[in-house]
Image: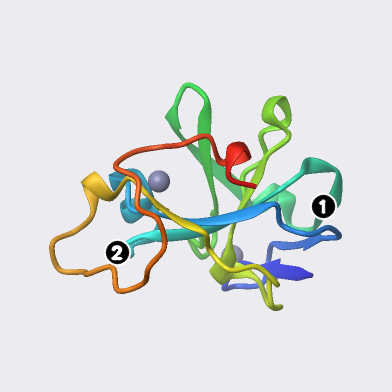
Amino acid sequence: MKGSCVCGGIQYELNDKFLIANHCHCSICRKVHGAAFSTSGHAQEDGFHWMQGEALLTGYRSSESSIRNFCRVCGSKMPSVFPEMNDVPIPLATLNDDPEIQPKVHLYVKSKVPWFEIADALPQYPAMVDLRELV
Ligand SMILES: [Zn+2]
Ligand SMILES: [Zn+2]
């Protein structure tokens, strides 16, 4: 499956299935995505490739172990690659294709905005959990 930023300068491809997908309500995700929460699918590094525009990527280091990639032209949030964890979180809304996975959990619900109500029956966690244990 393929995805891109909104200007189309950056294109990526995932030749693999997602392991898990989640919603995250943490304040960093909310601000970086400009939305009530973010929704990401997690894939392994092997199946992920930048097809075009990798030079347009820029990143904001939100913590020692985390970088938030985005397109320097259009500002779209883009996947980040964490080789040491073999984890590629991909913002599902930047895919052009069906991710063929549904989000399984809500994370960082303690940071949820007051103007959005979670209306599904997915498990809610106050902060982070080890997603590998939920796969
Ligand atoms: Zn772009
Ligand atoms: Zn988050």
Pointer 1 with pointer 2, Cβ within 8 A: no
Residue type, mark 1 in image: His
What residue lies at 57% left-to-right and 44% top-to-bottom? Answer: 58
> Would residue 86 appear left or right of 67 to someone viewing this image?
right
Along the line of sight, the residue nearer the viewer: 18 or 28: 18
> Would residue 107 appear left or right of 93 to someone viewing this image?
left
Q: What is the basis of the colouring in this image? A: rainbow
* Local crowd size for mark 1, using a 10 Å CA cut-off: few (<14), some (14–19), many (≥20): some
Answer whether residue 20 is visible to the viewer in this image: yes
Q: Quadrant of ligand 1?
A: bottom right
| Badge number at residue 96 | none
What residue lies at 60% left-to-right and 38% top-to-bottom? Answer: 133
Work out which residue is located at the far bottom of the displayed protein and give it. Answer: 97
> Would residue 54 appear left or right of 66 to someone viewing this image?
right
| Badge number at residue 49 | 1
What residue lies at 63% left-to-right and 54% top-to-bottom? Answer: 20
What residue lies at 54% left-to-right and 61% top-to-bottom? Answer: 73
> Would residue 122 appear left or right of 135 to someone viewing this image?
left
Residue topped by disc 2:
36
Indicate whether 105 appears above or below 62.
below
Where residue 53 sits: x, y (%)?
Answer: 73, 57
Indicate whether 8 appears above or below 125.
below
Where residue 86 sits: x, y (%)?
Answer: 73, 34
Kindly state the secondary structure of the residue where label 1 is placed.
strand
Residue type, mark 2 in image: Ala
Kindly state the secondary structure of the residue where label 2 is placed.
loop
Give the position of the N terminus as an image quadrant. Answer: bottom right
Gap in Å between the C-alphas at discs 1 and 2?
28 Å
Indicate whether 131 appears above or below 19.
above
Foreground: disc 1 or disc 2: 2
Where residue 69 sits: x, y (%)?
Answer: 55, 46
